[in-house]
Image (cartoon, rainbow, N blue to C red):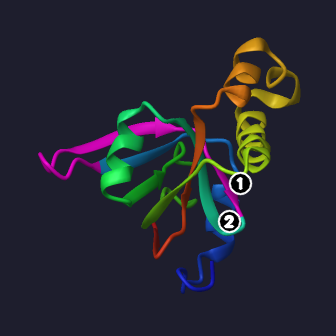
Amino acid sequence: MANALKTDKKDLIEDLLAKPVLARIATTNLKTLQPHVVPVWFAWYDEKIWISSFVTTRKIRELKDNPRCAVLIEPKQEGGKLQAVLLEGPAELVTQPRELVKEIATRIYIRYLGSEGVLAAEPQSWLEDPENLLIKVTPKNIMAW
């Protein structure tokens, strides 16, 4: 994060990114210039935001045409603490190796479902689905307030 983040808020940002709160990813359709914002589960790993998704979603179609995106993490505000982190940068769609996709998707699902919840039929089928992929966002800008 040192390249993208030059602030005294680094520890607060790291704490916020470690929490299992929803993020919102914003993409843009290049033909209509219409922004698209959707809530997503994520993991902060290796100084990147990782998001599990499926090939057929609108956000993936838009990222294929335009990899620029923004990810906003904004938990419930708690008196005087950091309110939000906005990460901007290019997205890479990761489909291979399948072991990596499954490993990081499992981390994401455990964050939100717990170690028992991830064993249920539906998240397990997501992990095995060949259309499951990862969005890897390498932040070029990080803003926090």
Residue 86 in sight in this render: no
Region rendered in magenta: 28-45
**Does the magenta portion include 127?**
no
The one nearer the camera, 130 or 7, is: 130
Q: Which percent across, then down, holds residue 123?
A: 72, 22
In the rendered structure, the answer to whether residue 127 lies left or right of residue 92 reads right
User: Disc 2 versus disc 1: distance between alpha carbons?
Assistant: 6 Å
Q: Which percent across, then down, holds residue 7?
A: 55, 84
Q: Which percent across, then down, holds residue 37?
A: 34, 41
Q: Tell me the number on the disc at residue 48.
A: none
Q: Are marks 2 and 1 in contact (CB under 8 Å)?
A: yes
Secondary structure at badge 1 equals: loop
In the rendered structure, the answer to whether residue 129 lies left or right of residue 7 reads right
Image point (71%, 54%), residue name: 18
Residue at image mark 2: 14
Image point (43%, 30%), residue name: 56
The one nearer the camera, 55 or 84, is: 55
The type of residue carrying mark 2 is Glu
Q: Residues within 10 Å of mark 2 (few under 14, many from 20)?
A: some
**Does the magenta portion include 44?**
yes
- Residue 58 placement: quadrant: top left
Q: Residues within 10 Å of mark 1 (few under 14, many from 20)?
A: some
Residue at image mark 1: 18
Seen from this angle, which residue lies furthest left? 32
Q: Quadrant of the N terminus?
A: bottom right
Q: Is residue 93 above or below residue 115?
A: below
The one nearer the camera, 141 or 62, is: 62
